[in-house]
Amino acid sequence: MTVLADFIAALDRGTLKVVDLTQPLGPDTPVIGLPPMFAPSPGVSMEVISRYDDKGPAWYWNTITMGEHTGTHFDAPVHWVSGKDLPNNRCDTIPPRRFIGPACVIDVTAEVARDEDFLLMPEHVTAWEKQHGRIPPNAWVLLRTGWSKRTNRERFLNVTPEGPHSPGFHRSTSELLAKDRDILGVGVETVGTDAGQAGRFDPPFPNHATMHGNGKFGLASLCNLDQLPATGAVVIAAPLKIVDGSGSPLRVLAIAPA
């Protein structure tokens, strides 16, 4: 109990802080767009059940409707065809220990400012490791791009006639992280864990295919990554325990040095 007591004491003293990496979730939350031949994911809709009225005089609550992969959300391995046959691949079967891990924050904001279609390459990872140490197993690798500063829906989704444009991971980098570093998963500030143009890649959507095919996770639409150090923080990213769930909106919290 000493470790846990020390942890609470550090929070109370302010030597540790809790950083919320979660975007607000509501009807204005942007959702990923898909080509018209595919079923779209709905945005958030809310309907009041009662609000201190004749339908419920002392209580307020709502019904909510949305896709599993809306706002700041978790991608389980079963989300992608490459992970559909893996054991414990759904939100209700993943061992909860796997939701918690150290954060490795790779800052590419300068590169993304120059190139909206920037892809993280293996050499970027190894350069980061030369400065901060090797990425440990069961870590969350978070790609800091500054994309969450785009509070305007159009700029956040950044869709042109050629499709959406946003940064992401090269296939070789996803393979390095999933196989050689054995991470928990990746987290991004963009609407999805693949680059905006990944539908045009060969193969398409390589980060989804690689991560989920190797039993790893994804976190999308994160924010406040600029409040985390490159190393030294711990991320807690627990999805709702949805039966057979492919993913879930969630509240992502980081514990970091103050």
Image: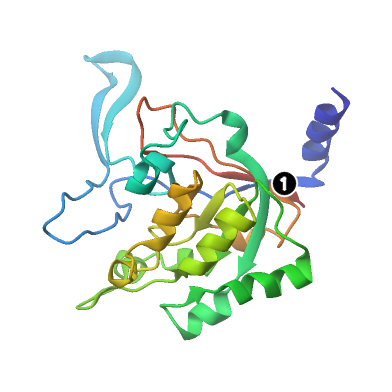
Q: Is residue 84 left or right of residue 168?
A: left
Pick the residue in front: 138 or 165. 138
Q: In this view, does 93 lie above or below 234?
A: above
Q: Is residue 53 above or below residue 20?
A: above
Q: In which quarter of the image is residue 12?
A: top right
Residue 76 is situated, as x and y percent measured from the top left of the image, at 43, 41
SS at mark 1 in the image: strand
- The residue where tag 1 is placed is 17
Q: In this view, does 38 lie above or below 132?
A: above
Residue 7 is situated, as x and y percent measured from the top left of the image, at 80, 35
| x 43%, y 42%: residue | 77
Q: In this view, does 162 lie to the left or right of 87?
A: left
Residue 182 is situated, as x and y percent measured from the top left of the image, at 62, 50
Pick the residue in front: 35 or 251. 35
| x 38%, y 49%: residue | 71
| x 36%, y 32%: residue | 245
| x 72%, y 46%: residue | 17
Q: How crowded is mark 1: few (under 14 residues within 10 Å), some or many (20 or more)?
A: some
Residue 212 is situated, as x and y percent measured from the top left of the image, at 44, 48
Question: Would residue 130 be seen by someone viewing this image from the given angle?
Answer: yes
The three-letter amino acid code for the residue at tag 1 is Lys
